[in-house]
Amino acid sequence: MAQPARLRIPVHLGVIMDGNGRWAKARGKRRTEGHVEGVKALRRLVELCINYGVGHCTVFSFSSENWTRPREEVAFIFNLLRRFVASDLQKLIRNNVQVRIIGSREGLEPSLVRLIDDVEAKTASNTGLVLVVAFNYGGKAEIAEATRRLAREVAAGRLSPEHITEQAIEAALYTAGLPDPDLIIRTSGEQRISNFLLWQAAYSEFVFVDEYWPDFDEQSFLKVLETFSLRDRRFGGIGVAQP
Ligand code: IPE
Ligand code: IPE
Ligand code: MG
């Protein structure tokens, strides 16, 4: 493969962390063990983002469609989030990481909502990596929720329909204030978006890797960045290579 002259570092990296279950199955383990290994890979990713200067990183950790999984698996994933917060919060604070959790709060236990609010509050003033965790997140649900919010403003006479612009919609999404992801990685060989950041991914570059998420390491990360660095992003224009 051609080598980029310089590694381009994404301002906002999105990651669909997929393949925990298959990773476990391939080793004769239970799916839940794959999720435990997935958390280790997430820790590695956070370190990599800090070391390489990625500004924002959004990880897809539980989708609004993942509720269709067996109840025990869902409960295990929810517990993992609690355990991750308990074990890693102090380190995230030390590393100047700001944590944001996006997704619907509906259907979450009040104690979990409090935990999420607490993590966000405790890291809100941090100025380093912005780690966005998409939990109970669905892109369509996010757009529907934003639409309802704007419709209420119109109904109350505080907003005219003419002011429903792209900017107004963006400001009503969970990701308000964040730049759009310039790069989205999906592991495990699947090549689909699965309802992740639908609006925000309008001009994202996608890199699909075959490895299962628990195997994603620094070497995989660098390979993805090399691929990304060679992409010619045109945003509807004619690009830089044209005479
Ligand atoms: C990604 O791994 C983690 C979640 C969706 C919670 P999967 O659990 O989807 O693993 P596979 O795709 O079944 O291998
Ligand atoms: C996407 O993976 C969601 C997360 C990684 C959290 P899925 O495993 O749920 O996606 P599908 O079902 O293969 O499309
Ligand atoms: Mg999957």
Image (cartoon, rainbow, N blue to C red):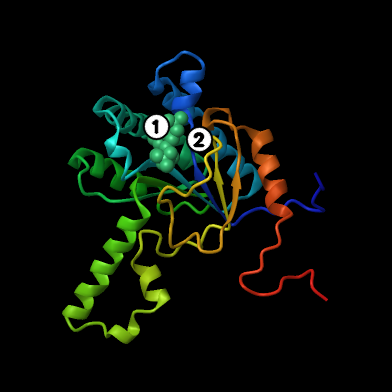
Whichever of callouts 1 and 2 sits on the residue coming sooner in the sequence is 2
- Residue 2 as seen in the image, left or right of residue 53: right
Q: Nearer the viewer, residue 6 or 142?
A: 142
Residue at the disc numbered 2: 42
Secondary structure at badge 2 equals helix
Quadrant of the frame with the C terminus: bottom right
- Ligand 1 placement by image quarter: top left
| Residue 18, image x, y percentages | 48, 36
Residue displayed at 31% across by 44% down: 116
| Residue 146, image x, y percentages | 30, 65
Q: Is residue 136 visible?
A: yes
Residue farthest left in this picture: 156
Residue displayed at 65% across by 36% down: 220
Quadrant of the frame with the N terminus: top right
Q: Do tag 1 and tag 2 residues touch (Cβ < 8 Å)?
A: yes
Residue displayed at 27% across by 38% down: 67
Residue 209: which disc? none
Report the number of numbered marks: 2
Query: Disc 1 to disc 2, how far (Cα)?
Result: 10 Å
- Residue 230 as seen in the image, left or right of residue 149: right
Q: Tell me the mark number nearer the camera, choosing from 1 and 2.
A: 2
Residue 84: which disc? 1
